[in-house]
Amino acid sequence: MATGNDKIQFRGETEKQASQIVDQMRLGGVNLSELARRGLREKLRETLSDEEKIQIHQQYREGEISEDVARILIGDGIEEIERERAAFEEATELDTDGVYQS
Amino acid sequence: MGSGTRHPVLVDTDALIAVANTALWPKITETLNLTTTNICVQELKRHVQETSEYPLDGSREQWIRNGSENALVPFEDDANSSFTVVSSVPRPHGEDAGEKSLQQEVSQQPGAYTFAVLMDRAGRAAINREFDQLETEGRAVAPPFLLYLLFDADVCTKEEFCQACGELLKGEGWTGYQAVQAAWEAIPVDCSEFLPDDVLAT
């Protein structure tokens, strides 16, 4: 859990050993922080249920969570809403001849 | 089954299931001209055959069965020239055969369709690329657009439109939520006075 500072800490003895093995095998080692950040983003997204995604989007719309945070969690959804809004707006401008029963 | 005529609105299986579960479905059948493919009709029939006759209340299975049954009625009525079915040749296969059949229709019949309505985002993107290559204008949009067509023609009230959006939100999860949010922003319309807060987060 992130607190006042931006450091994330967690226990993982075996994971630490595993990362050390890879680190030693590679010239220049591995950027563990970057890997952890990417992994955490990916796994957080994966664990979200439909209901949670909807709640997050609601909180984002109400300004309760920042855009950066919302995009980490539901970035695809935010982009999809923007894309569909544009398509929908374009569709409302099109000719509706034949759409309605006469 | 009405066949042959191509109406400007082409709809796929999942879009039909979504709107046929709303209270506005009877008004859709009385107001709009819709075309689908024989592939989508087969998918609807398969849904009815493969789901339990008495699915659990509120289950996804019930949503799919109920929507499929409702959607099939006007398309299977020979006397109904407003709901037509066209045949897909060659026949698309696979899990997304219905979506593929719409894409194939749009590319084979340039100018016949103005709107393609699909629930799946990848399917919509593929058809919009197809529309972009055609000389005639057209757009692939999500199912709330069908509800909007009623609202825009004053066939339903704002409250009825919003309630039907609420039904889509409940039945289609995150995918439906994205489609409904996009529609509300595009129209634009504020449905908050008609929908309880928790409909958005349940």
Image: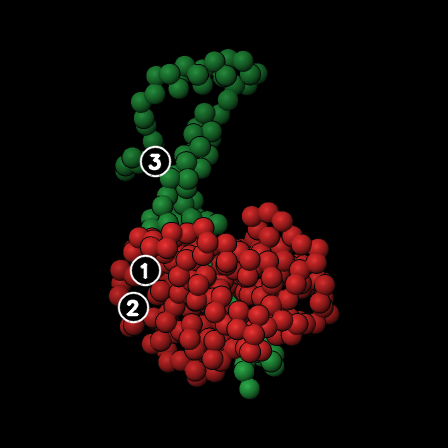
Identify the element where label 1 is drawn.
Answer: helix
Q: Is residue B111 left or right of residue A25?
A: right
Looking at the picture, the colour scheme in use is by chain
Q: Which mark is residue B10?
A: none
Q: Which mark is residue B200?
A: 1
**Amino acid beneath label 3:** Asp
Q: Who's the residue at 37% across and 16% down the image? A: A14
Quarter containing the C terminus of chain B: bottom left
Per the rendering, the colour in which chain B appears is: red
**Amino acid beneath label 1:** Leu
To which residue does mark 3 refer?
A6
Q: Which mark is residue B195?
A: 2
Label 1 vs label 3, nearer the camera: 1
Have a look at marks 2 and 3 and say if they share a chain: no
Q: In which image quadrant can residue B173 be found?
A: bottom left
Between the residue at mark 1 and the residue at mark 3, the CA separation in whole angstroms equals 32 Å
Q: Nearer the viewer, residue B45 or B61?
A: B45
- Dot 1, crowdedness within 10 Å: few (<14), some or many (≥20)? some
Q: Position of residue B125 (x, y in %)?
A: 59, 57
Q: Who's the residue at 45% across and 72% down the image? A: B147
Identify the element where label 3 is drawn.
Answer: loop
Letter of the chain in green: A
